[in-house]
Amino acid sequence: MSFTSGPPQTTQQYVLDHLRRAILTGRLAPGSPIRQDALAEQLGVSRVPLREALKILEGEGQVIYRPRRGYMVAELALEDFLEVYRLRQILEEEAVRRAIDKMTDEDIERLEEAHEDVVAAAKSGEIIAMATANRRFHFTLIDAAGMARLCKFLNILWDATDVYRSLYYGQESNRERVDREHRGIIEAVRARDADALVQRLDDHRTGTVGAFSEFLARRDS
Amino acid sequence: MSFTSGPPQTTQQYVLDHLRRAILTGRLAPGSPIRQDALAEQLGVSRVPLREALKILEGEGQVIYRPRRGYMVAELALEDFLEVYRLRQILEEEAVRRAIDKMTDEDIERLEEAHEDVVAAAKSGEIIAMATANRRFHFTLIDAAGMARLCKFLNILWDATDVYRSLYYGQESNRERVDREHRGIIEAVRARDADALVQRLDDHRTGTVGAFSEFLARRDS
DNA sequence: CGCTAGGATTTTGGATCCAATATAAATTCT
DNA sequence: AGAATTTATATTGGATCCAAAATCCTAGCG
């Protein structure tokens, strides 16, 4: 969930934020067409900024566009899912290997703060707050690599599965697991142990991949 | 250069193709602002499809957008360059490892055809035709992996340095080198030797990275 | 001579309107 | 009755117009 902070400067940004949230929460369901006229009216804007926002989401693969047919919310097949996680594995390894030696004490501090926010949100059962904090946790690490494109690609990959991540956090046992694994990740960062960090991130992802695969297999049947 | 083939179905696509070419050939120079009104008039279209095309290019990092300031053609610093090539190394390794066992005889045939087109274009000194064929050569390999997102990311990375690639092909010695290296790549594919293929692709890139680094270092001084 | 302030101009962002295409419905024909 | 064809409707794509913001230019001041 890479939302812009503060009040939106332009209408397109406002619309973009709204669309991201609507997709994330499932209010715009995967596979459903996006009726520009209705949506624009609902938001109290014209179709122009809406269309520009949709073009951004199209570039990120969040919506599918066919000329003269319009936009629809993207659906993920199981194989798409596996691709996203495989690419995350590869790219996040690169990111953290670059980042680990660059990270300052403040970075590590922010990492811990984000983790605490995750735990707090988990306790009070706020799923979206938890997802947001979790994202901040992981991207504190990724951003530290200082590679703009890599960061962008990873944001796209995270966005693609955001809907399902919220589902994952719904379960109590998964929330505990996240807490434990995050602590392990922080530990590896402190020790500046790149191999251990990569290993722990891999393990961290594996859990979610398993849960998602199961979920999707059920859905598609 | 991922242009749409055939006549454009919508004006946005027409404009998008035009913009890609203009950026590729340097007619829209890196760092220069894009005046929407003038450009739209020049193309004989309104600003609406132009803006949508620009949004696509923004997503690909080809242009930079700042609200209320408009769009400008992206500039690559040396570090951006190195990032692009590092990411290509990582992602292309993944792509070809997946692809190598999936490739059919027809795929390999198309690979050779593309190579022959590269050589032919090189002989007659047609730089853009050479770049196009070269791209087809490499993406025959990459597409065979059957990973949509990976393919998209790699297209973005290739686009980012297209301008400079044409420069590289300008030199006779480089053209010979490309011929030789491509033959080695085909050989590795035929032998289904993934490790050798990855190695040869790495070597293939190394040559261009060296030339580009030198060029950029001169430019930025 | 340089710097700031004010206004004119350019340029972007968004709304509305119209045309072209796709989708849905109705009618006709077999 | 079912399929095909025509007609009607809904929806997208693009053009034009207007408002708001940024840039540029000039005049006034230190």
Image (tube, coloured by chain):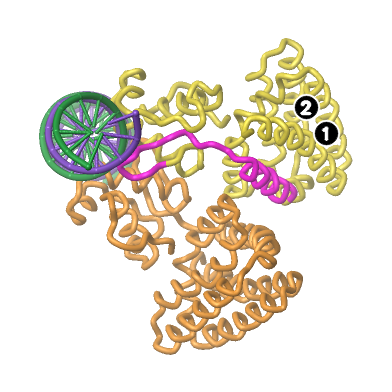
Chain colours: A orange, B yellow, C purple, D green
Q: In this view, does A116 lie to the left or right of A129?
A: right
Q: How crowded is mark 2: few (under 14 residues within 10 Å), some or many (20 or more)?
A: some
Which one is in front, B183 or A181?
A181
| Residue B40 seen anywhere in this rendered image of the structure | yes
Residue at label 2? B112
Specify the amino acid type for callout 1: Ile
Specify the amino acid type for callout 2: Glu
Residue at 78% x, 27% y: name it. Answer: B112
Secondary structure under the numbered disc 1 in the rendered image:
helix
Q: Are marks 2 and 1 in contact (CB under 8 Å)?
A: yes
Q: Quick one: label 2 or label 1, which is nearer the N terminus?
A: 2
Residue at label 1? B186
Q: Quadrant of the C terminus of chain B?
A: top right
Residue at 28% x, 52% y: name it. Answer: A9
Q: Residues within 10 Å of mark 1 (few under 14, many from 20)?
A: many
| Residue A47 seen anywhere in this rendered image of the structure | no
User: In the rendered structure, does residue A21 fall within the stretch colored magenta?
Assistant: no
Q: In this view, does A197 lie to the left or right of A69?
A: right
Point out residue B68 in the picture as x, y percentages from the top left corner.
30, 42
Mark 2 and mark 1: span between their CA atoms? 7 Å
The answer to whether B202 is drawn above or below residue B43 in the figure is below
Residue at 52% x, 75% y: name it. Answer: A110
* Magenta region, residue range: B65-93
Q: Is residue A132 left or right of residue A47?
A: right
Point out residue A201 in the picture as x, y percentages from the top left corner.
66, 72
- What subunit carries mark 1? B
Residue at 63% x, 75% y: name it. Answer: A204
Q: State which quadrant residue C22 falls in.
A: top left
